[in-house]
Amino acid sequence: MATAKKAPAKTAPAAKKAAAPAKKRTPNAAFMKALTPSPALAAVVGSAPLPRTEIISKLWTYIKANNLQDATNKRNINADAKLKELFGKPQVSMFELAGLIGKHVK
């Protein structure tokens, strides 16, 4: 006795999802507010008021330019003289970065 094969599932619901226009996210105003960096942070990112996102971006540019990412564990950042003043310790995790920066902006 031969068994009947099932027909492949229809993909109509997936087509409806693709046809719907994607909603554009509006940026949170708190992230876009320009903050004034402290003197320790200004030594790394500059003294001009910047949004928090730009501060983190410039900080990562500085870290990569000075080769401060730990070679064995790329999630850790080794502090040089400027960053040690900012972080308060010789090595931090990249997940601590935003929290530590919060103390240095107004």
Image (spheres, rainbow, N blue to C red):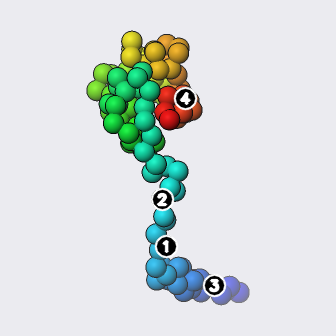
> Earlier along the polypeptide chain: callout 4 or callout 3?
3
Q: Can I make out residue 57 in this image? A: no
Q: Amino acid at mark 2?
A: Pro
Residue under numbered circle 1: 23
**For mark 3, does the 10 Å Cα neighbourhood hold few (<14), some (14 to 19), or many (20 or more) residues?**
few
Q: Are marks 4 and 3 in contact (CB under 8 Å)?
A: no
Rounded to the nearest angstrom, the CA distance separating label 1 from label 2 is 13 Å
- Element under disc 2: loop
Rounded to the nearest angstrom, the CA distance separating label 4 from label 1 is 34 Å
Rounded to the nearest angstrom, the CA distance separating label 2 from label 3 is 47 Å
User: Which dot, 4 or 3, sits closer to the camera?
Assistant: 4
Residue under numbered circle 4: 103
Residue under numbered circle 3: 6
Q: Nearer the viewer, residue 105 or 9?
A: 105
Q: Is residue 65 above or below residue 11?
A: above
Q: Position of residue 35 (x, y in %)?
A: 45, 40
Q: Which mark is residue 27?
A: 2
Rounded to the nearest angstrom, the CA distance separating label 4 from label 3 is 62 Å
- Element under disc 1: loop
